[in-house]
Image (spheres, rainbow, N blue to C red):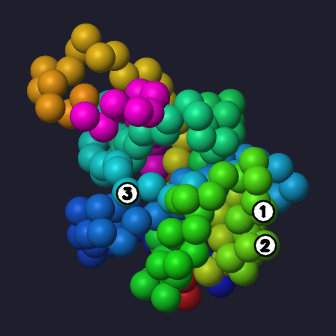
Amino acid sequence: MSFKKSDLMDLKINPFKMIGSDWFLITGGNKLADYNTMTASWGSFGEMWGKHIFTCGIRPNRKTFNYVDNDEYFSISFFNEKYREMLKFCGSHSGRDYDKAKETGITPAMLENTVTFEEAEMVFICRKMYAQNLDENLFTDKSALKFYANDPYHKIYMSEIIDVYVKE
């Protein structure tokens, strides 16, 4: 694997483009033989409790949900544009029915305490610090409820960014 640990404070990134336009994989699991990944396009980077934080939401009907919910660590992996079709596949097919790595040709790899993929350009290792289910009654902007007309509410995970790796 050709990743180099980087200093988070030295990164020159646009999180809005990375998350909202480029998309990424959230991967949970602590063994190459037992993990799942899913494409996401919602999340945020920030500061909380004196730590660098990544926040994401996962719906409980996603296979990846149980992996992230049950493990302490998960990864978020960003890819270059040539992997767009892989990201589409991983976001539209369930790991219950498909081996996503086999179907798309990506290579799972262990990095610290969790699974990521050798083809990623940048990987963040996250350690969960806080998790809570969204509550319909707590939405102050009810227009956001349109995202839940046919799907369950996300569980939100606030996680410390432990390390970041960049492709060498």
Tell me if I can see residue 159 in this picture: yes
Say if mark 3 contacts mark 2, CB within 8 Å: no
Q: Position of residue 67 (x, y in %)?
A: 68, 39
Q: Which residues are magenta?
A: 146-161
Seen in the image, is 13 located left or right of residue 157? left
> What is the CA distance from the residue labelled 1 to the residue labelled 2?
5 Å
Q: Is residue 115 above or below residue 72?
A: below
> What is the CA distance from the residue labelled 3 to the residue labelled 2?
22 Å
Question: For this rendering, which residue is in front, 123 or 69?
Answer: 69
- Residue drawn 66% across the image and 52% down it: 94
Is the residue marked by circle 3 packed among few (<14), some (14-19), or many (20+) residues within 10 Å? some
Residue at label 1? 99
Seen in the image, is 149 located left or right of residue 74? left
- The amino acid pointed to by label 1 is Asp
In the rendered structure, which disc, 1 or 3, sits on the residue that comes first in sequence?
3
- Residue drawn 14% across the image and 32% down it: 143
- Residue drawn 43% across the image and 21% down it: 133
**SS for tag 2?**
helix
- Residue drawn 55% across the image and 88% down it: 168
Say the numbered circle drawn on residue 102.
2
Question: For this rendering, which residue is in front, 113 or 97?
Answer: 97
In the rendered structure, which disc, 3 or 2, sits on the residue that comes first in sequence?
3
**SS for tag 1?**
loop
